[in-house]
Amino acid sequence: MSQARISKLEALLARVSGRRDEPRLHVVAAPAEEPVAAAAHAPEPVELAEPVAMAAEPAIIVMPDVPAGVSVGDGAPPTPSVIDALAAIRPEALISLPPAALGADARSARGPIARPSMPAPSEPEAPELDEPEEPTVAVAVPNLLRAVHPELTPAGDPAVPEEAPPAPAAPPAVEAPAALAAEPEPAPTEPTLPEPTLPEPSEPAAPEPVLELVQPAAVSTPEPPRVSVPPPRMSLPVRPSLPSPELVPEALPFTLLTERPPALPSEQESLELAAIALSTAPVIDLGGAGPVRVEVQPLSDLIEMPEVDVARVSAAVTVVPTASSTPPSGRGPAPIIPPVLAPAITALGGSELEPDVLAPSESAAEELVGDAIRAQLPSITGSAVTVSSPLPSRAPQSFGRLLSRSLALRPRS
Amino acid sequence: MTQSSGSTFDPAGYFAFDLARGSVHTRHGDRVLMLSSDVISPLVATAARHGDLTAVRGLGKRMGEHAARSLGGDVGAQEPERVLEHAAATLALLGWGVLGMERWGAALVLVLEGSPQLDADCLGLAALLGGLLTSLGGRDVACVPVGHTARFVVVHPQVAETVWSWAKDGVSLAEIVGRLAEDEAA
């Protein structure tokens, strides 16, 4: 990885962080010195030493600016030469930026999310994108890299040129929370929707997502850490509406490489990834109801649900159109999310989307799950959107009410 | 306010076998016949081909009446789980399989597992369940089979044909639900 690439990556991190007044983010390889030094004399690539508490993490760490007097690893901050050496040995362990993330509109990341299988660096063809209607998401995402940016792709990805085009000028500084309330642009995937409105070249850039790095103690480095490392927790606000994915086919919103073959995620991992998938594809088409925006945060609240069932949670999440959407006349918000969530949940390794099953006698376990979901739902309700639960509230719902709702269903116009 | 009190379904004494007269009656007084499903299936399949499943729907209505009688009181005001319990027990006693109920957003979906194979498109079972819910809900209800998942979407009869056309085109249940929206005027 050249210094230019490092600089570009850092520039993107600074952009996505949206906080110019804070220390810059640095990309360093860690643990770097030992494996790099050993590999320099080894005929075959060697395994990188893994951080103590991050067995599956890649050998890369994104950290804030190293304060004066503080060092990393053996006492000195990793140098570009160290990173170059690492890149020469294990290019897949590093991350790089797709052209769209640097040169094109970095907001234009709406589109399919990468399949769990990761493209090998030696594959001659670029990874094929799925249909936009089938969002999927990468699995086995390193916790730490989740805090980087979904647009980061592996250095060995053949779809990504080694030297990315020059980064555009930084977008104008915006107040991210306020700007997030901007009206979403129509999603171009459904014929029933209005024609997608592409942003004019002269149009001011939309706000970038805010990347919040919190709880430095959550991740540890192999050596006694002397520099706090950003944790995997993050808050992904809703991203602005996005132009047609055809315009930026290379801009995979969520492609990350790991050093190990991806494995099926656990339920909690699936849930976290589902939340990320929602966050990275915030404009969801609900047919005639128009686009909606989804915000699921904080992720930590989601992944800490005890004994959570992904399928049940997916059934619990309902997305309603934002105020700027145009629901069909005379109809209330469209509360149906399963068609939207089903492909993502399935691709995440979770079970097929299941409904809220009404059992003759609700077991205590089901009640616990339901309570857990209900308890967590307020925390995943964003200000710009509405995420609510169709699960029955603790107030019992009558059979007649259920039947009436079902009988009131009509084909969307 | 829903009604949650009441006894669970009691299957005891549901059938009364009168060997002297050679008849079988339910405890509600209906005379029933014990027939092999191999006999029923072709009859239902023929009725489905002719587009007249009135008799099967009528049978479902009788079952719904039995379940409603077992429930007692206003069925619509009772908890869905309790209604399901009695309806499922009634169907199971008559050998029609295990009834389940699911909510897909606003849509109510019935699941009937272990049921006899009557016709290829499950229209016979759909008619049976439609009659069952019509009696329980006190409103005209249509159940539309979706694929071969033993699931039936509960819809208004006005939209049943549309939903059925989607199902025949292979549209998944999730997508079907997504194509439907609550009509507040309904």
Image: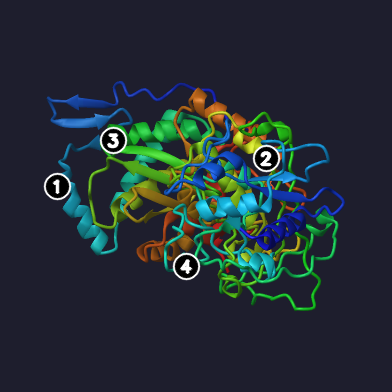
Can residue A30 be seen in the rendering of this structure? yes
Q: In which quarter of the image is residue B13?
A: top left
For the residues bearing labels 1 and 4, Cβ distance under 8 angstroms: no
- The secondary structure type at the circle numbered 1 is helix
Q: Name the residue under label 3.
A: B30
Q: Say which of B110 and A39 sits in front.
A: A39
> In whole angstroms, how far apart are the C-alphas of marks 1 and 4?
59 Å
- The secondary structure type at the circle numbered 2 is loop
Q: Mark 4 points at which residue?
A: A126
* Quadrant holding the C terminus of chain B: bottom right
Q: Name the residue under label 1.
A: B39
Q: Say which of A80 and A66 sits in front.
A: A80
Q: Mark 2 points at which residue?
A: A233
Give whichever of discs 3 and 1 has the lower sequence position: 3
> In whole angstroms, how far apart are the C-alphas of marks 2 and 4?
30 Å
Which chain is mark 1 on? B
- The secondary structure type at the circle numbered 3 is loop
Can residue A399 be seen in the rendering of this structure? no
Instruction: Tell us which disc is closer to us: 4 or 3.
Output: 4
For the residues bearing labels 2 and 1, Cβ distance under 8 angstroms: no
Tell me the amino acid under the disc marked 1.
Val
Instruction: Tell us which disc is closer to us: 2 or 1.
Output: 2
Tell me the amino acid under the disc marked 4.
Ala
Query: Residue B68 location in percent, x, y?
Result: 44, 35
